[in-house]
Structures are given as C-alpha cells and as structure tokens.
Amino acid sequence: MRRRTLLLAALVAAPLTLGFGAARAATEQNYDKAAFAAAQAAGKPILVDIAASWCPVCAAQRPILEKLTADPAFKDLVVFKVDFDAQKDVVRAMGAQMQSTLIVFHGSTEQGRSTGDTNAGSIQALLAKAKV
C-alpha cells in the first residue's frame, strides 16, 4: 500500500517538476539596484512598479498587475516593486513624480511609462512594450 501511495504521489508531482502544469508567473521582487542592473544587462523585459501602501490608485492597479503578470505571455517579465515613501532615491532616479507609476524596460531601454492608469487594457499594452 505504501509503495502505491508513493508511486501515485510521484505521478502527480511529475508534471510540476518537469515544467508542465500551471504557467510560470512573472518574477516579482523588491527593487534592488544590482538585480535591476543584472536584468537590464541580460536584456530582460522589466516592469518597475512604483507604489505606496496608502494609495487607492495603486490598490486598484495591484489586482490588474497580478492577473497580467500571471499570464504566460508575461512569464519572462521581471517586476521590481518600489516603495514610493521608503525608496525616494530610486523614485528620483526613475524620474517618477508620483506613486502609481509603471515603467517598462526592454533591457536598459525604457519602452514606456504610465501614471495613475487603472485600465487593464492599457496596462496590458504597456507591459507588452517590454517584450519588444
């Protein structure tokens, strides 16, 4: 009986370990200068999400971004979260004037940005620019 249980568990887990099953979501992490530079040097599609915990527009963007970045079309997208209040140096370096700013890069080249956008279609179009 135990052998059958182990075999069943192995068969269920096999698709996940072989890369089948659920689609891989975009990589999301807190902004780190070295990691950002490495992603740029590797020519990755990048989203910089500048948000504040108190911002209602940022709160409206969050579920849209979660849904879009889970889409297999954006599986290679690297998402860097920037805290508008705690990371003012990064906010300034990115040239952002306010929270709810989304900036997309392909490698080291900025491809587009938006501020205050909560339209899923236009955010999806913005993310698509990173895949150029």
Image (spheres, grey):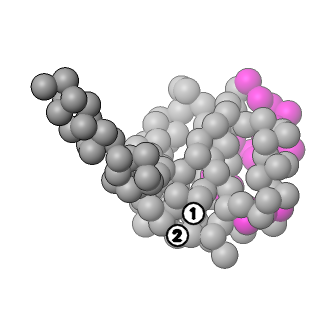
> Quick one: quadrant of the C terminus?
bottom right
x%, y% of residue 129? 63, 71
Residue 95 visible in rendering: no
Q: Which mark is residue 3?
A: none
Label 2 is placed on what type of residue?
Ala
User: Is 91 in front, or is 111?
Assistant: 111
Question: Image height check: is 8 above or below 23?
Answer: above
Q: Quadrant of residue 108?
A: bottom right
Residue 124 located left or right of residue 112: left
Residue that badge 1 annotates: 127
Label 1: element kind: helix
The answer to whether 30 is drawn above or below residue 44 in the figure is: above
Q: Residues within 10 Å of mark 1 (few under 14, many from 20)?
A: many
> Left or right: 9 with respect to 52?
left
Residue at position x 38%, y 56% from top? 20
Task: Provide residue 71's location: percent of width, then percent of height.
Answer: 42, 59
- Which residue is found at the position 43% from the left and 66% from the top? 121
Residue in the image at 53% along x and 33% along y: 55
- Residues at circles 2 and 1 in contact by the CB criterion of under 8 Å: yes
Residue named by callout 2? 125
Instruction: Please tell me which residue lies in front, 120 or 46.
Output: 46
